[in-house]
Amino acid sequence: MDELDTREWLLTNGLGGFASGTVSDARTRTYHGLLVAAIAPPGERTLLLAQVDAVLMVGGHSYELSTNYWRNGDVSPRGDRWLQSFSIDPLPTWVWGGKDWQLTRQILMPHADAVGEDAGNFAIEQRNRVLIHYHLEGENPARLTLLPLIGDRNFHHQQRYDRERHFSQVVEPRRVIFQSHYRQLSGISWQLSWSQGNYQPDSHWYWGYLYPEETKRGLSDREDLYNPGKLIVLLETNDTVTLEASVRGADGNAPPPPTRDIFTELHRRNKTRLATTFDKVTRPQTDPSSVYSRLLQAGDQFIAYRASIQGSTIIAGYPWFGDWGRDALIALPGLALTTQRHELARSLLHTFGQYCNQGLIPNTFPDEDAIPLYNSLDATLWWIETLGLYLDATQDWDFLVQQYPIVQQIYKAFTMGTIFDIRVDALDGLLSWESPGHALTWMDAVVSQTPITPRQGKAVEINALWYSALCWAEKWARYLHTHGLATEAMGNIENHARRYAQQAGKVKAGLQSFWNPETGYFHDVIKPDDQRSPEIRPNGVIALSLAHCGFELEQGQQVLEVACERLLTPYGLRSLAPESRFYIGQYVGSVWQRDRAYHQGTVWSWLIGPFIRAWKRYYPDEPIPWMADALLEHLEHEACLGSISEIFDGNTPYPPRGAIAQAWSVAELLRHWDDLYPPSGNKPELMQNLRNPDETH
């Protein structure tokens, strides 16, 4: 390689833990590491094993195979010069080689598929592990020296050398146990074990690693790592060695050192788990080597176990996001309903519902005994919308009986008023909120307690969700009454149905106040002082995409034509039309600069889902004016190989930005795969009367 390939790879373990790095093996982010363990799944993510430097001695020559950035600007050593190939499928695989030798490395992160309600802490903790497998080919035997670089720090932060920080190590046959100590605090006990080799303790600090991606983001970008010793392995030709890094249980126990064939066995188990998970998905494209199968695997990476609720959750994105209510509920149809993982969907909806408080669904789950955060208005409405989609898909009316009291609680809270001054306007029935310093919709960037996209008042997609929620509630109340499923505690269910229907009719009429005839689009927000926001944003498209829609055909078609002209790109919809004076076309710079651009023109790929749903409603006989080719090319060859980024620049050439793998980005493409690539195999063509997205700003 003449230049470092900093495209990224990602492995996850179903607990929130992960391993991540680059094609060239140079760590470019604080979040890169071989074992980032979720100590309290999916939280308390802690970097333990950053990397393993490798030096190969063969035929009288020494080859340094690692690649590192340093704070003085150097890149040294340049192990990528010996890199012959990299592949992501079926596992991250590097092949280094010279004239008469070849060393292959593969990384495997076993999945916590067996963790359940009867699992103890040890069973959870021991599954935070990663295996690194080396295979030598060539004409001569070789000596492989492996140097682990370790830490014990929150995955958001860097580690610095401190004379009061040290790492204890207990050397045992074929394994060494590490634990950090800082003043009076002891860190996580974990072990590094191996199938063969001789370990020699020989402690060193390496100072001044540089993370250039953090430099670009205007964040702290330096780190010091600790090398406790070296493992020397004498390899014959066609010989292997496997390392395993694993968190030890609370009782000090841990799995035994790896055997010669454990890597192959655990890889087989991972493949079997995936095949079983998606055995109900019967599309022609589900061949293991297909793009669709890789998309399924990408979606599976976001499903995690949460210890505090003993149930499943969805990680919003990697490497830095946790599980967020809004994101999870938007992603759920694509990740769980489309893939027929109905038990997963039911579990997630149940979990969110049981935390409903004052009519609000939490935006973040609690860790341990922490209080959930309820800083979202739309998470509640997305919960009702997603519950409706689940019930339609499964006919699970017993679940409706369980969840209907929560629907009642939400309705009562919104109509009577709840926190953040969330309330229903008695005049038009629309849902409003007013709380300076907060951002309760998905456009939630806040800098210095000031929302970048202030949307207090009546937001268009919030009220479209409110209308759909009322329609769902009426439908469910009538069903419960008709089929004799209503309980005494529910009250007079017939009255509920009439009340929901009346309220829905009032809201439908009130939605017309969002119409802007000058732009042929919706006002984004009706502010508390009754001023209207004329900006062209994708929230109008979201409003057209829901299960129940209160807008007429002509309005919907006009909105979609404007969206095609001003918002649609090959990677999704812009968050603001380029003509706006607030538009920012690049998501770059400091935290402040990036937060300002986050919802002011940046492209969000998840929004292509609402666009497709709206298009199918208002142009049912016309081909969808968008193809996923660019996004699938991105999935295969850009950013994080095998996943889809959170956002893209609003300006061409739309480089990927933000989190390298985002749940709702993957989920919405899965949800609409058959719309874009029907079983016939014919790809939809762009409508000739609409501007090609490549020709926009």
Image: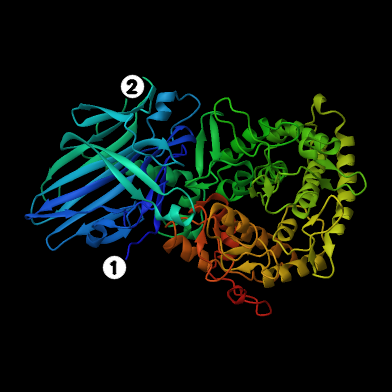
Q: Residues within 10 Å of mark 1 (few under 14, many from 20)?
A: few
Task: Please tell me whether residue 533 is drawn above or below residue 352 in the rendered image.
Answer: below
Residue bearing the label numbered 2: 252
**In the picture provided, is 525 more to the left or to the right than 510?**
left
In this rendering, the label closer to the viewer, 2 or 1: 1
State which quadrant residue 552 falls in.
bottom right
Please give the label number shown on residue 227. none
Q: Residue furthest right?
A: 427
Out of 407 and 533, give the one closest to the viewer: 533
Question: Looking at numbered disc 2 in the image, what kind of residue is underneath it?
Answer: Gly
Residue bearing the label numbered 1: 2
**In the picture provided, is 603 more to the left or to the right than 161?**
right
Pointer 2 or 1: first along the chain: 1
Task: Please tell me whether residue 205 is drawn above or below residue 368 in the rendered image.
Answer: below
Tag 2's secondary structure? loop
Q: CA distance from mark 2 to mark 1?
A: 46 Å
Q: Position of residue 207 (x, y in %)?
A: 30, 44
Question: Looking at numbered disc 1 in the image, what kind of residue is underneath it?
Answer: Asp
* Quadrant of the snapshot with the C terminus: bottom right
